[in-house]
Each structure stands twice: as C-alpha cells, then as structure tokens.
C-alpha cells in the first residue's frame, strides 16, 4: 500500500519556540494511527499540520499527492481529503444536525441540496442520530454533538480523518458511544485515521500503530500492544503509569 | 400664552414634511452605512485569522493595504465631529475642488452632502461593530469550516456572517438610532429636516413649548419604529 501522508523532517515553530522537531512520519492508506503523549508534547500541532490548520515551518509534507510547502495554494485540496474532529465538537450553532452534516457536501463538494441532505441523513443514521436531524447543537448532549461532528467530517468523503482528543471534553458515560462510532469507521470503511487520544483500550483494539510523543518528538512507535507492554523509554513508562490510573 | 393645541395642528404638515426628510436621510444612511461598515469592518481584519487564516504571497501585502485604508477611514471619521464633516463637505469641499481643478461652479446640494455625511459617518461606527462581532466568533468554528475544504468566501457568508450578525443587532440598533438623531445636525447646512422645520416655525410664531414638544415626540416615534424593527429581527434569529 502507498503512503497517503508523509512528513519529512518537519519542524514547526510558534514565534521563536520550536514545538515540533524534525518529525519523520509516513502513514499508509487505511492505517489507524493513535498518538499519545503528555500535554504540550505537540500532538495537536502535529495533526493540525497535516490538514494545514498550522503551516509547517520547515521540512516537507505530502498529503495524497499535494506537496507542502511547494503547493501552498492547494491547501483546500488537502482539506477536502482530510477531515477533522475536534475536542470541542465545533458544530455550527446556527445549523441543525442535518444542516451541519449537509454543509460540507453542499458547499465544499458543490452538490445539490437534496443530494447533500440525503448523504447527511444516511450518515446521521450511521452514527445513531437519525431521530435528531432537526435539533440544534445546543439541544444535543456532548456525545451526540461529537457524533454529529464525526458525521459532518465524513460527509465530504475524505480519505483521512484526524481526531484531536475527541472524547476528552465528554462526560464519562458518553465516551463509549463516540468510541463505538470511531471503531466502526475504522473497521468498516478502511478509513485512514490519525487519532490523538488517551483511550488506551481504543488504541489496543483498532490501532495499527501507536506513536508516543514527548517534547515535540516521536519517541516511540510500533504495534500498540507491543509499545504498551514493552515501553523502552522512561518517559513512556512514566506516562503509561499515569494513563492507567485514570 | 398658555398651551395652544391648535399651534400643533397648524404646524403638523410642515413638521411632517421635515420628518419625511429625516426618515429618508436616515434610511439611506443606514443602508449605505451598513455597506460601508461591512466593507470597512471586514477590511480592518482582512488577512487576519479572524477571517479564516492568514494569506500568503501577494495577498498578504494586499491585505495590509486594505487594513490601513479601512483603519484610516474609521479613525478619521470617528475622530472628527459629524457637524464638522457636514460643513466640510458642503462649504469647504467645493472650494477644494476649485483649488485643485479647473471646475469653477462645483457645488454639492445640501441634501446630497447630508446623505453622504451620514452614510460615511454611520459606516465608520458600524465598521467597528462588524469587526467586534466577527472577532468574537469562536475560532474553532472557523477551523471546523476550513477543515471541510470550503473557500474563505463561503466561510464568511455561511459561518462567520450569520453568527456575527446575530451579535451585531443590539449595537446596530444603537447606531441606527444615533444616526437618526444625528440628522438633526444637518440644520447647519440648511437641510429641511425635522429639526430645521421646527426651528423655522418657532422663528415665526415663538411657540417653543408646542413646537419642540411635537418635534421631540416625532423623533421618539421614529426611533421607536427603528428599535422595534430590530427587536423583531433579533427575535427571529434567536434560535441559538
Ligand atoms: N498557536 C500557538 N501559539 C503558540 N504556541 C502554541 C500554539 N499552539 C500550541 N502551542 C505550543 O506548542 C506546544 C505543543 O502544543 P500542542 O500541540 O497543543 O500539545 P498537545 O496537543 O500535545 O497538548 C505547547 O507548548 C503549546 O503551548
Ligand atoms: Mg492537544
């Protein structure tokens, strides 16, 4: 299989502070990569660089044939192929559930309204929210909002989905419903996924690769069970100890 | 000299003509001011993260120029009294034209000067209202929109616009009412709006109480209509 995402010697700085140091990472089509690491280690910045919400400071990024920085003008092409799910859901508050999901197909993919809504309805059904299509985000629980957000990201038929701590803002009883949706996407659709999460169960169950980041570097990477069972670095041992206690 | 109700009924036709002109100037001022205000308000934050993300290359330089031009406009208007702006446009601007060109008989109608002044004046304040509302839109929503691959234009029209507009309504109501009342200052360039009409009637019959009371009530009716229309729009949009 070919690489759909490639980072070559990527650095990212905010002002004078470099927060990603010489990252090399290749992700294959259909792969599910789980990223863990302590707060501030650069996990969010890493995945935000992939869909160019942050522009890399140096190095090279290739996403599905688009090369950054050479082809900066084609950032929108990358974003059409790389969807994102946020910790804070970020649903459009003035649109209903179906409006949120149909928005991408209608505006970004330029489909007709009916076609876009049909796609949206199908996806809301898939995330278990068929009965909630006319609800505004403010009328939905956190778990429901995040499932709508996942449906919204899927609606433009991306090749890659990025998740930035999708369950961290949820009450514990709602984490399961969101993880279940993510698992079904990983298993059924063969979607390429990059997931920042502290849900080690999810990592073990559906992750093809686990990446541990610390201080802007990829410190360890490998099969999730192996990395979890045999952490090499002190930092990872320490980190896993903390995660398990939660 | 007691309170004579007949004075009011006699002066009503003339006052009504004045009120019509006041309303006319105000409506054009509001519509034109909204257009100016949206352009200048967005202009002041062109190329910043408030409108999606920073552009690169030539667009970066263009956006800097747009920001300076918009900022210069807003600060110039806010920094000078509207009455001075009106007098400058009506009395001084024709002289300026004469001084720098060969056009001898350049004149601006008083009403034209009034309309231009109110449009640009309201526009400057509305620009700040627009800018404030737009930068208050949650950045996460912009990122969600951009992540779907929509264009900056679509982002502004479908995401930033509706959310920001909802927040603009209360301060806009304020500005519309201020603009309406500001039209009374055009008395200084001889526009026959409501205050001017009142002043003229007063000068002929000296019935200050009846005339200024009536004028005040007429202003109050017009500002109430404005305020209620905005409340109506606000209620319709109170869905999130
Ligand atoms: N927009 C920004 N401006 C300045 N510094 C930032 C910005 N975003 C992130 N950082 C810094 O970059 C580092 C990595 O942040 P982040 O990628 O959010 O870490 P994580 O997601 O692993 O918690 C942190 O030190 C953070 O303070
Ligand atoms: Mg983070």
Image (tube, helix red, strand yellow):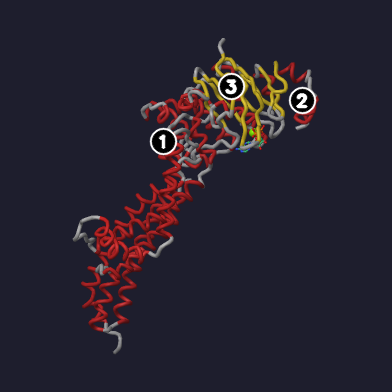
Marker count (numbered): 3
Residue B73 has which mark? none
Tell us which disc is closer to us: 3 or 2.
2
Tell me the crowding category of disc 1: few under 14, some 14 to 19, or many 20 or more residues within 10 angstroms, Cα based: some
Check the picture and name the quadrant holding the C terminus of chain A.
top right
Residue at 35% across, 54% down: B33
Tell me the crowding category of disc 3: few under 14, some 14 to 19, or many 20 or more residues within 10 angstroms, Cα based: many
B209 vs B24: above or below = below
B126 vs A219: above or below = below
A224 vs B143: above or below = above
Residue at 22% across, 68% down: B17
Mark 1–mark 3 CB contact (< 8 Å): no
Q: Determine the secondary structure under disc 2.
A: helix
Q: Nearer the viewer, residue B17 or A213?
A: A213
Left or right for B9, reference B72: left
Please state the horizontal and vertical placement of residue A26, each as a whole percent of the image: 61, 17
Q: CA distance from mark 3 to mark 2?
A: 22 Å
The residue that disc 3 covers is A193
Residue at 20% across, 57% down: B103
Please state the horizontal and vertical placement of residue B7, each as a whole percent of the image: 24, 81
The quadrant in which residue A162 appears is top right
Task: Tell me, yes or no, whether dots 3 and 2 are on the same chain.
Answer: yes
Q: Does the residue tagged 1 have its C-beta within 8 Å of any atom of ligand 1? A: no
Residue B154 has which mark? 1
Please state the horizontal and vertical placement of residue B141, each as a whole percent of the image: 51, 38
**Residue A122 in sight:** no
Left or right for A130, reference B3: right
Q: CA distance from mark 1 to mark 3?
A: 27 Å
Left or right for A45, reference A135: right
Mark 3–mark 2 CB contact (< 8 Å): no
């Amino acid at each position: 299989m070919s690489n759909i995402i490639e980072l070559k010697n990527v650095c990212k700085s905010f002002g004078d502070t470099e927060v990603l140091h010489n990252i090399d990472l290749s992700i294959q089509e259909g792969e599910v990569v789980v990223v863990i690491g302590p707060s501030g280690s650069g996990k969010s910045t890493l995945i935000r660089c992939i869909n160019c919400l942050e522009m890399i400071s140096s190095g090279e990024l290739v996403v599905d044939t688009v090369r950054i920085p050479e082809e900066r003008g084609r950032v929108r092409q990358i974003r059409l192929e790389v969807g994102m799910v946020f910790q804070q859901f970020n649903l459009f508050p003035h649109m209903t559930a179906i409006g949120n999901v149909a928005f991408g197909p209608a505006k970004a993919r330029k489909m007709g309204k009916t076609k876009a809504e049909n796609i949206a309805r199908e996806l809301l059904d898939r995330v278990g929210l068929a009965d909630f299509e006319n609800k505004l985000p403010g009328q939905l629980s956190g778990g429901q909002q995040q499932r709508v957000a996942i449906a919204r990201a899927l609606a433009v038929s991306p090749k890659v989905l990025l998740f930035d701590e999708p369950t961290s803002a949820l009450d514990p009883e709602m984490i399961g419903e969101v993880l279940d949706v993510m698992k079904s996407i990983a298993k059924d659709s063969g979607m390429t996924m990059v997931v920042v999460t502290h849900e080690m169960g999810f990592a073990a169950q559906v992750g093809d690769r686990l990446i541990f980041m610390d201080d802007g570097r990829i410190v360890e990477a490998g099969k999730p069970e192996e990395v979890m069972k045999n952490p090499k670095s002190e930092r990872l041992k320490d980190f896993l100890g903390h995660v398990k206690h939660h | 000299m007691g309170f004579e109700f007949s004075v009011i009924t006699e002066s009503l036709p003339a006052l009504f003509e004045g009120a019509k002109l006041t309303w006319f100037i105000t409506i054009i001022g509001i519509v034109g001011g909204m257009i100016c205000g949206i352009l200048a308000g967005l202009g002041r934050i062109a190329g910043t993260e408030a409108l999606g993300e920073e552009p690169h290359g030539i667009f970066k330089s263009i956006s800097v120029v747009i920001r300076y031009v918009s900022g210069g406009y807003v600060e110039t208007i806010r920094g000078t009294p509207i009455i001075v702006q009106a007098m400058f446009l009506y009395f001084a601007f024709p002289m300026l034209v004469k001084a720098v060109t060969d056009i001898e008989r350049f004149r601006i109608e008083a009403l034209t000067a009034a309309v231009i002044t109110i449009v640009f004046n309201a526009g400057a304040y509305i620009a700040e209202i627009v800018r404030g509302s737009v930068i208050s839109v949650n950045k996460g929503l912009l990122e969600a929109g951009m992540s779907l691959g929509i264009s900056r234009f679509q982002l502004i029209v479908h995401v930033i616009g509706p959310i920001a507009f909802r927040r603009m309504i209360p301060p806009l109501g304020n500005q519309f009412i201020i603009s309406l009342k500001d039209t009374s200052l055009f008395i200084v360039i001889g526009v026959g709006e409501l205050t001017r009409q009142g002043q003229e009637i007063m000068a002929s019959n000296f019935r200050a109480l009846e005339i200024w009371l009536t004028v005040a009530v007429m202003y109050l009716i017009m500002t109430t209509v404005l305020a209620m229309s905005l409340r109506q729009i606000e209620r319709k949009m109170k869905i999130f």
